[in-house]
Amino acid sequence: PKVTIVGAGNVGATAAHIIASKNLADVVLIDVAEGLPQGKALDMMHMRSVEQFTVKVTGTNDYADTRDSDVVVITAGIARKPGMTREDLLGVNAGIMKSVIGSAMEASPNAVFICVTNPLDVMTTLAFRESGLPANRLMGMGGVLDSSRLAFAVCEQLGCPPAAVTAWAVGAHGEGMVCWPRFTTVDGTPITELMDEAAVAGVVQRCVKGGAEVVAFLKTGSAYYAPGASIAKMVEAILTDSHEVMSVCAHIDGQYGIEDLYMNVPARLGKNGVEEVVEFDLNDDELAALRASADSVRAGLANLPE
Ligand code: NAI
C-alpha cells in the first residue's frame, strides 16, 4: 500500500517514521518547502537497514508522485506557539487546507483522507466542504491523541501499566474536549471506582491541558511524537481493515442527537474509512457535555472564511 503525508514538518515526518518502522506502507512525504521532504525521506531510508523495514520512504514537491495513494494524511500548516490556542491558527491554515485538499484528491481520488492540521474540527469540515468527498472517506486525527493523553494521566495517577488502561476522550479537539471517566477503565474497572472525584478531575485536566503543557516546554512549536503515533494507529486500522473502534473526528449525522458535524466520537475504522459512528450509552450529563462540545465546534465554524 501507499500512504501520502502532506506536510513534512514535525508531525508529518514523525508519522512517516512510525509508519515505515511498522512496515505498514510505502510513504510519500510532500511539502512546499524544497528539499525538506526529500532530505527527511533519504534520512529515513538510511535508517532502513538499522530498523529492518522494507517499505520505501520518498520525498517530493510534486503531487504527481503521490498518485493513487490508499491513505492521504494532511499535516500541512502552522503549529501553535506558547500562549496560542488551536483556534488562533484558523486564518493561515484554512488557506493551506483549501489548496492541499484539491491537489491531493486529484492525484488520489479513491484514498481515505485524514486531516491533522489545527484547528482540527474546523479544518476537517473545511476539507469536507471543499472536496465533496463521501463522509466515510474523510476524517480527522485528534481523539486518538487526546485519549492517549488521558491514558497517560491515569497511569501516572494510579501507577498502572499502559496495557491495563482503556481511555476515552472525545468532542472538540480543543478546550471544549470531553473526557468519559465512566468508560475509562483500568483492567475493566472504571476510574470513577478507583479514584475520588478530585483525582478524576485532575486526570481530566491533565488530558485537556496536555498539548499546551508540551507547547509550554518546547516554546518553538507543538507536540509531534504522540500525534505521529496516533496517525500511524489510524493508518494501520484502515490499511489492515481492522474494524477497531477509536476516538475519531468523524462526520456525525444524528448520533448523540448531533446533526451534520465533524467532531471526535467513537468510530469504527476499516478499509473504507469510517464504517460507523458508535453510540455509547451516555447519561444525561455526559450527553449534555458532548452537545456543549459540539456547540464549541459550531462557534469555530462560524469563523471560517466563505
Ligand atoms: P511544522 O511547522 O513542523 O510543519 C508543517 C509543515 O507544513 C511545514 O514543513 C510546512 O512547510 C508545510 N506546509 C505549509 N504549507 C504547505 C502546503 N500548502 N503544502 C504542503 N506543505 C505545506 O508543524 P507541525 O508541528 O508538523 O504541525 C502541523 C499541523 O498539525 C499544525 O497545524 C498543528 O497545529 C497540527 N497538529 C495537530 C494535532 C492533532 O491532534 N490534530 C497534533 C499536533 C499538531
Image (cartoon, rainbow, N blue to C red):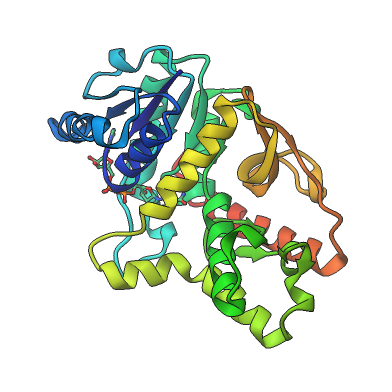
Task: Decide which of 254, 33 is in the foreground and name it.
Answer: 33
Task: Decide which of 30, 45 is in the foreground and name it.
Answer: 45
Figure quadrant of residue 95: top left
| Residue 123 shows in this picture | no
Image location (x, y in percent) of residue 136: 65, 28
257 w.r.t. 110: above or below: below
Residue sitting at 24 percent across and 19 percent down?
A: 62
Residue sitting at 44 percent across and 15 percent down?
A: 108
133 w.r.t. 120: above or below: above
Ligand 1 image-quadrant field = top left
59 w.r.t. 176: above or below: above
Residue sitting at 22 percent across and 29 percent down?
A: 45
Image location (x, y in percent) of residue 262: 62, 43
Figure quadrant of residue 76: top left
Count every numbered label the image shows and give the total: 0
274 w.r.t. 177: above or below: above
Left or right of 52 in this view: 39: left
Image location (x, y in percent) of residue 181: 72, 69
Image location (x, y in percent) of residue 114: 50, 35
Left or right of 78 in this view: 40: left
